[in-house]
Each structure stands twice: as C-alpha cells, then as structure tokens.
Image (cartoon, rainbow, N blue to C red):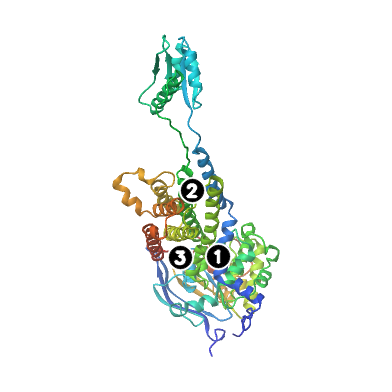
Amino acid sequence: MGGRAGAPRASGGTTGRERGDRFKRSSMVQLTLVRFREFIREPEAVFWTFIFPILLAAGLGIAFRQRGPDKVLIGVVTSSPGSAAVIQSLAKDSTLVVTAYDDSAAARALRTGKVALLVVPGSAKDSVRYVYDRGRSEAVNARLMVDRAVQIGAGRVDAVRATDTYVTEAGSRYIDFLIPGLLGMNLMGSSIWGLGFSIVTARSKKLLKRLMATPMSRAQYLLSYLCSRLVFLILEVVTLVGFGHWAFGVPLRGSLATLFLICLLAAISFGGLGLLTASRAKTTEAVSGIMNFIMLPMWIFSGVFFSSANFPHTVQPVIKLLPLTAVNDALRANMLEGASLAALSPQLLVIVVWGVVTFFAALKLFRWR
Amino acid sequence: MVTPFDNSAPALRVEGLRKAYDDVVAVDGLNLQVLTGECFGLLGPNGAGKTTTIEICEGLLTADSGSVEVLGRHWESDARDLRELLGIQLQDTQLSEKLTVDETLTLFQSFYRDARDVGEVIDHVDLSEKRYSRVGGLSGGQKQRLAVACALVGNPQLLFLDEPTTGLDPVSRRQLWELISQFQAEGRTIVLTTHYMEEAERLCDRVAIVDHGHVIALGTPQELIDAVDVSHLPPPEPRKTSATLEDVFVSLTGRTLRDE
C-alpha cells in the first residue's frame, strides 16, 4: 500500500523473535495484559481478593475452633460441716471448676452467672442440696456431673463399667463449613466487581467509546476480562483452599479436577452476572449500588456463613435457585462429602443456566458508549 | 486501482446531515467537503453541532438522515476498513492511569493491521522520557500528546482531532501544532475542531463555521477575514490592524466562540 509507513509484516518461516512479536501484536494478548496490569496495580483490589478472605477465614476459624470439653463452673457453700468432703469429691472430676463461697457470696455468684450450680452440703453427712435454674441446659448438665462426682466420692459403685472414646471429625467443624462458603463468596465478588467496576469505569471515562473508534473486536474486549479472571481464579482457589487445608485441615475429599471445574463454571457464570450489572450503568456509583443489591441477598441467603437450611421451608426452592447457593452447595458436597461430578449435576445446571441467561441479556443490553 | 490517497477525491464528504437528540436538533442539514491532504477546521460555539458531526464521521454515532463518505467508503458497508484508516482523538477520553505510555500505545497498536512502531510514535510526540511512566503521572500536555499518539499509532490516512489543544499551555499547544503540520506534510488529511482562532488561522487550509447545526461560512481563514464588514464590529478598542477570524466569528454568530 503506497505511502503507508507501517512495520513490515512477518511472513514465511517463524523465528522465536517473530513469534514473540506476533504474541505482542495480538490484541487478545494485549487486552488481557491490560486487565492484569490494572488489577495488580490496584493494591486495594489485590487485598480484597486475596488477603481479606484469608484473614476472614483465619479469624472465624480461630473464634469458632473446637476446644476440649467446656469447663463447668460450680459453687460450694462452706457454712455446713460436710463441705470439705464435697469439695474433695468434686476435685476428682477435672471438668468441674469448684469455688467455695459463704452464704451471701454464693447467692450472688449464682445470680450473676459466675457459677452454673450451687452445692449446699446438708448438716447431716448423707445429704446434699443443689440450687440451679433447671431451664438452663448447662445447669442441668452440671447437676448430673456434680451428683455423679458426689455419689462416687461417697462410695457409690457403678453397676456397669463404661469407657469413653473421644472423636473429632474433620469435616464437621465450623471452619469446614466456612471455607467452601468463603470460596463461593469470593468467586462471586471478584467476578462481579472485576467485570462490573472495571467496565463501568472505562465507560464513564469515555475510554470505552475511544476503543470503539479503533478496529478492536468487541468480543475480544469482553473475552479479555474472562481470560484474566480465569488466571486470577486459579490463584484465589489455591490460596483460600490451600490455607484452609494446611492451617485448619479442611478436608478435600472430592476430586481436585471437579473442584476446579466448579470454580471455573462459577467464575464464568458470575462473570455473566457482572457483565449484566455493568451493561448500562454510566457511573461507578450507580454500578456499586447495583452490585450490592445483587450480592447482599446472596451473602445472607446462600449459606456463606451459616446454613441456608435456617430459612423457612417455603422459601427453600427460591434459595436453591440462587447461583451462589448452587456454587456453595456444590463446593461443600465436593470438598466435605467427596461427591462425584454426576451427583453435582443439579447445582452445575443452575450455575450454567445463570451464566448463559445473564451473558445473553448483558450482550443485548450492553451500551458500548 | 483507486487508492484512498487520490488527491482529486475528497477525503470526507458530508451531505444533508441531520441528527436530533430527544428534544434538540444537534445537526440540521450540514454539508461539508474536505479535500485529501487538507487541514480542515470546524469552528463554532459550544452546542453548535461540531462534536456530533465529527462523531458521525468517526462512525461513533449514526445520523438520522444524510450521507457521509469517508475516504471513498461508507460506514454501513466498510466499517472495519474505515476504523483501520482513521485516527481519532476524542474530547473527553481519559486513558487508563495505571498503564504506562508504552503499554497504552502497545495496546492501541495491537488493534491495527498496519500499525506504526510504538517507539517511533513515542519519539514523534516527544514522550521518550516518559515512555515507561504511568499515564496518571503525566501533565495535561503530555496526556494530550499521548491521546494524539494513540490516534497516530494505527498509521491513519485521516485524523480527527476534537479540541486537541483545549486547556494546554502555549508550549504544549505549539508542540501539538508541530505534530499536526508534520502529519499534513506527509500528504494526509486532518479535520479538527478548536476554540482558538489563532490555531485555526495558523493550521487550517480552510475552515467552516458551524452554528445551529449547519455551516454558516466556509473558506480559507483569509477569505473569511476579508469578507467581514469591519464597520459593524463591536469596537472593543481602536483597531490598528484588519479583522481577525475572531471578528468573523462574532459578526456571524453574534456570540463569542466559547459561549455556552
């Protein structure tokens, strides 16, 4: 073409340098690189995507960790002669924490909840009185434990010899419930924020309009968000699941390939939702409102921090159809129960349908200017 | 073979262009012809329809009626080709602040089949020292030169510049003038809008003054100046010289250029 001083086109054999050039000159590669750069150079985004979920998991995991058996706090009134024998009997049970009180202090300790139960030894050696609120299960429990210790101390012999075997089941703790929920929430958040915010920012700065004036492919522009999401997705899944596994022993009973497939479908599906939130909004304030409106109900209803089974029976079918519920259920079934891919098909179907419907709705509504 | 560089064919032909928004007619029967190799200026008060006209020519808006022919092509049938051949700078684009100058231009370069070398364009707009700096740290003049660089990197035949020097200091403005003149010296065409009469007189071969959505005067800056009846001018001060393009403007529109 006469008069056009362009770079010569590569043709014929390919050297490494030419391949590198072609890579560099690919608009798909460049658009995806821009997505990376914009993300990595935004320290807040990195914090909320990678660091915050781990801090949250660590905080909640420690707060709700399984401790040994709870200590039972007992008060003994010392005014009666039998109190020394009672205290001696109770000291043999290590779960009982015994404090001695005089009459008035004992009443106050019970009233203020410092002790669950008050033992009043009788004037005669063979009698004892328990003072407690029988509406409180810990007080009833204390009554059983204290009475058993008192009876054994006084010489009772059990008719049946019992031994205890203690178990702690990985997979049934709060942290095991929490990690898949946090992962689902994170997949939703980073897809919706990642697409929604960034596209609306480009639109409000008229950058989208400027790009429309170039020969850039619109499909590639949208695809570049998806490509960069998929790379960050791997990092998100590995950091959060890895942290839960190594720090708290959260089980990974299902196949890792299936786990990754669920995450992949979830990220793509939420990407469609993100695109839909971004399809018309002109300002970042507007899109933030839309995103919170979409995400907040799912944080509550979809079983992130507590089971969605807590909600009434009548709304369960609706809750089951929310995309985050499907993702969380599938992640928990895979990680905690080792469910097979086939067993997860109802959840995967919900995820895919959400993705397809939102994606096409977004394309239909999308405002490129 | 007809090439787009045929000097006898107009680079841009606009006939009977009309565009209305909800309740405002922005462009109302506008006609224009820009010759290949020409630097053509569109002048007019804000709201006169300049930006709407330019954005229709750039393929960013569709007209309600009228025809637009750019480099012998039409947007309806040759959009992809046209996007390759046009260089565009919009009035209000903010490029991503997190990217460097080099990254921004490499991105724009990747969209074009026959693009220029990024380093060469950066040299050309005098941003070599800032090549690896973030866009967010550039001055207003540097950002504007980068916007022009983004328009140049696709190696365009026709350059649309919408108020390229608004808000720039005199030095930055002169740097941009230099760039525009160089582009024209290569035989390529420029269409620009401006509020600065000095700029139009200096750069443009011909100017059109637009008001209420159509062209009310057309000619070389000198022709327009010569046609003004000086006696009707509101005298701001005793004049020693002849009329300026600014006077042409005021006497035709009854407004100053930057009237809202």
Circle 2 sits on which residue? A179
- Measured as percent of width and height from the top left, residue A90 is found at 48, 21
Q: Position of residue A257 (x, y in %)?
A: 49, 60
Residue B174 figure quarter: bottom right
As drawn, the residue found furthest toward the left would be: A314
Q: Label 2 crowding class (10 Å Cα cut-off): few <14, some 14-19, many 20+?
A: many
Kindly identify which residue carries mark 3.
A368
1 and 3 marks on the same chain: yes
- At label 1, counting other C-alpha atoms closer than 10 Å, the crowd grade (few under 14, some 14-19, many 20 or more) is many
* SS at circle 1: helix
Q: Is residue A133 left or right of residue B108?
A: left
- Asked if one can make out residue B198 in the rendered structure from this viewpoint, the answer is no
Name the residue type under label 1.
Answer: Thr
**Tag shown at residue A32:** 1
Q: Nearer the viewer, residue A240 or A207?
A: A240
C-alpha span from label 1 to label 3: 19 Å
